[in-house]
Amino acid sequence: MKYKNPVIKGFNPDPSICRVGEDFYLVTSTFEFFPGVPIYHSKNLVEWELINYCLVDDEQLNLKNSRCSGGIYAPTIRYHNGMFYMTTTNVSNGGNFIVKTQDIYGKWSKPIWIKQGGIDPSLLFDEDKVYFCSTHHDEDGKECIGLCEIDIETGEMLTKTKIISYGTGGRHCEAPHIYKIGDYYYLMTAEGGTEYGHSSEVLRSKTPYGPYVSSPYKSVVGHRKYGDLEIQAVGHSDIVEDQNGNWWCVSLGIRPLKSNLLHNLGRETFLSPVKWTEDKWPIAGNEGKILIDMEGNLPAKIKGVSDDFIDNFIGDKLNLNWNFVRNPKLENYVLKDGLTMFGDEQTLNDDNPTFIGIRQKEFEMNIQTKLEICKNENGKAGLSAFYNKAYHYDVYIENNNDENNIVYSQTIHGVTTIMKKVNTNKSLHQLMMKTNQEKYSFYYYDNEWKLIGESPTAGLCTEGTMMMTFTGTYIGLFADNTTAKFRIFKALVD
């Protein structure tokens, strides 16, 4: 059966997957965005529905003072004896922890903290024992993988951390997952750094503690030798067996802009079938390559779903697709006859703006909104293409001395520049953003759509930031120092 990658578009890195019967569940990293760790469900491994989040309150997810691309790193989801477990790292507050639930659609537990350090934690349930592995450093500071046995109920380490592998020789050995398959324990790692040299490697042993030997074949997945492919930086993989005995690999990867080696959509989730060699080593995809167009024996038929997103703000809860930046002040968002956002002194350039956004899923999109803004001198509200607080493009309505202006601004390297202003006396405003691989274009409606400004897509790309970042572009709504009511939000794939 033919299918297309990525299977989960937009900023969805570090995928981890598990199966329960004929149902598959997948989680990804969220960094400084809230809620944390989205849960996706699928029957066919290609069409995924966002059904919940693992971390939904301040006790589970403290993002206070989280730097850009801090917060939540690399979750792992596993299912054992009727219970779902998710382990991850809050690199900004607390370290490694586990949450659990019997109801994948319900509330997850309070964090169970684990003393073993590092990042990218994973769990292995092996008969009556539970192993916890994560990145580690030896006494000389060299990167490696550490393993210990834990009490899954309390998080207590039952053994000291033991170094089990230094990987296969690539830099930044990380993202360990251990699987008991047949007679072997297989250790999957990510190596090469999460840039263009990224890959997923595999080693195996007769015991969980090693010694591990690396595969004699090429990487499980890796594109470092294939610079001409549409997908790059693939790695950080997890594998799962479907109900028919077929194996599958989910990996992160990027779709660079065609004109250069930049990407703005973030690291996305890709799917590839896994083949086992005669001597029992896994290789994913087309001899380690993941393509846009692929084929495999999917566990269920593809139905066909749209990537369009429309929200009329009806009901008493925000759509699951909306995210906040760090822990939100929920009282600033009220659903009644639309979405009213009560903006305070925190702007998009600060840690806790009044902002909601969805992941930009495609290069070419058309985004529109209608809003009313209340009078408040120097307040503003509108539409944003938001990477982080130092990088965003905005079109908005500005209150200034009892008159309104439509303003287009861009923030690059933390410096905000007003690009253009247009006076308006309207009470209901319509704003639009069009995106493609070259530029973001912003419009306002005055009897017809009128262009107010354009800026290059390169300004919202990971590779151009002044700090190391791992996220992707969000498209969303904001209010600074004013109250605004949004009537509708449309994000349509062109």
Image: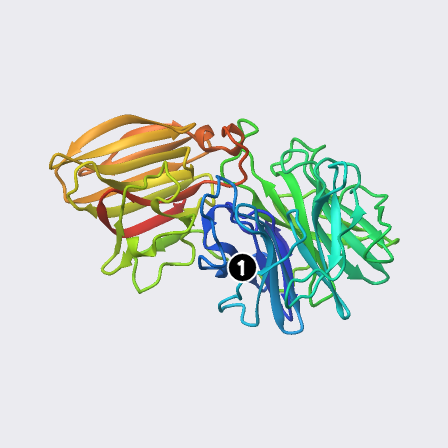
Mark 1 residue crowding within 10 angstroms, few (<14) / some (14–19) / many (20+): some
Q: Position of residue 124 (x, y in %)?
A: 72, 61
Q: Does the image show residue 5?
A: no
Q: Which residue is mark 1?
A: 40
Q: Position of residue 62 (x, y in %)?
A: 47, 52
Give left or right: position of 151 versus 164: left
Give left or right: position of 467 versus 431: right
Q: Nearer the viewer, residue 320 or 174?
A: 174
Q: Residue at x 79, y 54 (%)?
A: 186
Q: Quadrant of the N terminus?
A: bottom right
Q: In which image quadrant can residue 321 be found?
A: bottom left
The amino acid type of the residue labelled 1 equals Tyr
Q: Does the image show residue 55?
A: yes
Q: In which image quadrant can residue 330 be found?
A: bottom left
Give left or right: position of 118 versus 204: left
Q: Nearer the viewer, residue 227 or 62?
A: 62
Q: Position of residue 208 (x, y in %)?
A: 81, 57
Q: Secondary structure at mark 1?
A: strand
Give left or right: position of 202 versus 90: right
Q: Nearer the viewer, residue 245 or 466?
A: 466
* Colour pattern of the rendering: rainbow
Q: Residue at x 49, y 30 (%)?
A: 465
Q: Quadrant of the C terminus?
A: top left
Disc tally is 1
Q: Residue at x 22, y 59 (%)?
A: 337
Q: Nearer the viewer, residue 82 or 423?
A: 82
Q: Residue at x 57, y 72 (%)?
A: 102
